[in-house]
Amino acid sequence: MIDEGGIAALVRPDSVHGRCYTDAELFELEIRRLWSRAWIYAGHESQVKRPGDYATFEAARQPMMMIRGRDGAVRVFFDRCPHRGARLCGRRRGNAGESIRCSYHGWSFEFDGRLDSIPYAKGYEGTSLQRGNPEFDLAGAPRTQSYRGFVFVSLDPDVPPLAEWLGPARIGIDDMCDRSPEGEVEAVGDCHRVVQRSNWKFFMENQLDVSHAMVTHESTGRAALEVEDDIAARTGQRPLHYHMLSAFTWPTHKWNELMLTTNYPNGHSVLGGYMALRPQDPDSLEHERQLAAAWGEAKKEEILSRSIHHVLIYPGISIQPPLQQLRVLRPVAPDRTVSEIWHFRLKGVNEPIYRRALWYYNLVNSPSTMVNADDLENWNRIQRGLAAGRPEWLSFHRNAGQDELLESGAVRTREGLSEAPLRNQFRAWLGYMGRES
């Protein structure tokens, strides 16, 4: 049994013990103390538009369902029949019809979770199993809250309110929604799902590990740059979707200057942007006119002048707001993680702007891209490499002690290559893991 002192000894100010990524007992503690206490992304309200529409997901490995009620409210329940425990939803998403009905014994439930009917109910006369007894209604998530259409749940009834817990990382959702003249986005179809044969923390660290990009993704960027140069020579134009990949060929000093992070005490981080995402083509200018009409010129400039590439919401969400992308993690085992890659449409915006987000979704974040494959390969190599018992520690030394500590307690990097985001995540990890109750 690992006690608090044993957990604390695994994290140094500038390095982390390999057990944090491989130990089965530690992983089970993470599920109980971290994933069950944080806010977990459930889905977007637009995924369940009509009464009875549902979408399933997992929170701390527990099966859940998000469903739209007849009153229009979106609720989240444990996906488990209170009779004999069968899962109620047979698909990842769908519509329940007139009621939520269990396929095992035919119990049915209203969309607000109340027990609706039991076949052969006479057999239960004189017992506590009766309609109206909340023990036999669907069990709701201990906490459910929504922020601008993004639904979160927590298994901890005492978790801080969602907006407070998100803190400055709310900008990830705000920046995405503000780019719509209606202030809203909607999820597009289903997501890409990837099974990573590696610990969940490698994904989170990698999102803000600036120094890996020009090494891991250099070959992909080089191939894209050759095509981009050829197109430019023939047409005088450099298509944005090639730039999304060719930027990986930039020299180190450019990444170091542009990709600065602000890292908050609860593990969240904001990474500055690096791609030129404000082109002056007719479609982009039309989008700007739409935003000015909706929000006014000053607010439009504020929105489009933001320079954000990633917003990391600890422990398991990565948002790229200018391109309407969201990735969420569902840990399965110490060496197994499911990642979901979602993309969104800005409501009220012309189709070419959506297509730009779709390019990035398919070129960079989908399972079929070389970018994603490069990362998955490296994370798997690390996981397999940790089977070697020596050396015991993983280095987070870059720029340790050189970053700027703000009055708020946040840490702002002075160089993009700083490993401050990784150190920050493990400070948050210790905060969760050191609390037994």
Image (spheres, grey):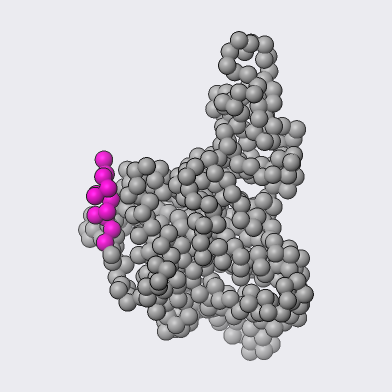
* Magenta-drawn stretch contains 265: no
Q: Is residue 315 visible?
A: yes
Q: Relative to residue 4, is residue 211 drawn left or right?
A: right
In percent of width and height, residue 386 lies at 30, 56
Q: Quadrant of residue 276?
A: bottom right
Q: Quadrant of residue 174?
A: bottom right
Identity of the residue furthest to the front in this view: 407
Q: Up-down: is 90 above or below 360?
A: above
Q: Up-down: is 328 above or below 424?
A: above
Q: Which residue is pictured at 38% across the width and 51% down the height?
A: 432
Q: Relative to residue 288, is residue 224 drawn left or right?
A: left
Q: Relative to residue 134, is residue 181 drawn left or right?
A: right
Q: Is residue 374 visible?
A: no
Q: Give the camera-side residue of 178 and 108.
A: 178
Q: Which residue is pictured at 69% across the width and 52% down the height?
A: 46
Q: Which residue is pictured at 77% across the width and 75% down the height?
A: 293
Q: Relative to residue 78, is residue 111 drawn left or right?
A: right
Q: Which residues are magenta?
A: 1-12
* Magenta-drawn stretch contains 6: yes
Count of labels shown? 0
Identity of the residue furthest to the left in this view: 390
Q: Give the camera-side residue of 437 and 250.
A: 437
In percent of width and height, residue 399 lies at 32, 75
In percent of width and height, residue 298 lies at 68, 79
Where does the N terminus fall, quadrant-wise?
top left
Q: Which residue is pictured at 73% across the width and 48% down the height?
A: 49
Q: Up-down: is 337 above or below 205?
A: above
Where does the C terminus fall, quadrant-wise?
top left
In percent of width and height, residue 84 lies at 55, 24
